Amino acid sequence: MANVEAIRILIGVIGNVISFFLFTSPVPTFVKIIKQKSVGEFKSDPYIATLLNCAMWSFYGMPIVHPDSLLVITINGTGFFIELVYIAIFFTYSSGKNRRNIIIALLVEATLFAIVVFITLHFFHSTKDRSMIIGLLSIVFNIIMYASPLTVMKMVIKTQSVKYMPIALSLANFCNGIVWLIYALLKFDPYILIPNGLGTISGLVQLTLYGTYYQTTKWDEDDEKPKSDVQLSIGMAILTVRPDNRG
């Protein structure tokens, strides 16, 4: 049993490393925003959505909700603060209207999260019940966020081009899903298992599409990047990774 727990911790640490890489992958986008002193066509919506998602998973990993989940807290807590930095940069370089929208969205999220925390702690008195309610809510948020990679995959099939679906992120998506899937199986946790099962399937489909349409991709064409958000929803924390989000 001790060996299983040690393996689980090791797998969780590996998952933290991969997830951190995915959280920091949009850094070039924000370097570009800072240099241009403008957000241009980039959108803050995915980062705001990821912020709430990280908050939910961090709460899920708390001892009062789901004991023995420190590694869930570490990566999602880290992701929460990384997303805050991204949003702060967006806020700094956005117009007045966009700033108001960001403030409203954050207030709505903060209110929703506060309500969830209050209800969970005051009406559910066992960690089993608390894990269930927060786990189910987190799964719902994750499934909603899977709409983004589905959009990208549809674009790949339609254009027969993988130019805007980076292989490194697709591979990291798949590996991240596998790692957290194993983590959930070692000490059975259906609320981590389900989203990461979906994340693994999503990553596998992305890799399959890459192999299928690599030969038909015209890499030398300088086409305008599609207007849709290029996001890869990732496993445990469902990290939304945006190589180049445009609105």
Image (cartoon, helix red, strand yellow):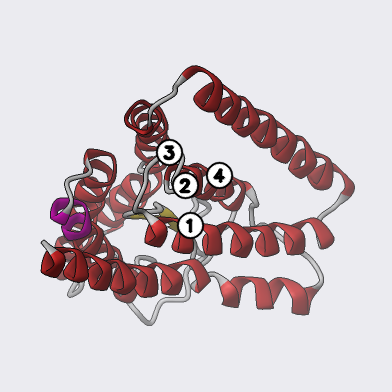
Instruction: Give the number of the mark in front: 2 or 4.
Output: 2
| 182 magenta-colored | yes
Disc 4 designates what residue?
A: 49
- Residue at coordinates 43% horizontally, 56% vertically from top-left? 239
Residue 65 is marked as 3
- Label 2, residues with CA under 10 Å away: few <14, some 14-19, many ≥20: some
Is 11 or 218 nearer to us in this picture? Answer: 11
Is there a contact, CB below 8 Å, between mark 3 and mark 2?
Answer: yes
Q: Measure the alpha-carbon separation of dots 1 and 3.
A: 15 Å
Mark 2 residue type: Met
Where residue 33 appears, x then y in whole percent? 72, 71
Q: Measure the alpha-carbon separation of dots 3 and 4.
A: 22 Å
Q: Which corner quadrant holds the N terminus?
A: bottom left
Instruction: Give the number of the mark in front: 4 or 1.
Output: 1
| 90 magenta-colored | no
- Label 4, residues with CA under 10 Å away: few <14, some 14-19, many ≥20: some
- Residue at coordinates 36% horizontally, 52% vertically from top-left? 152
Mark 3 residue type: Val
Q: Measure the alpha-carbon separation of dots 2 and 1.
A: 11 Å
Q: Nearer the N terminus, badge 1 or badge 3?
A: 3
Instruction: Give the number of the mark in front: 2 or 1.
Output: 2
Disc 4 on helix, strand or loop?
Answer: helix
Mark 4 residue type: Ala
Q: Measure the alpha-carbon separation of dots 4 and 1.
A: 13 Å
Disc 1 designates what residue?
A: 76
Q: Is residue 83 shown above or below 98? A: below
Mark 1 residue type: Asn
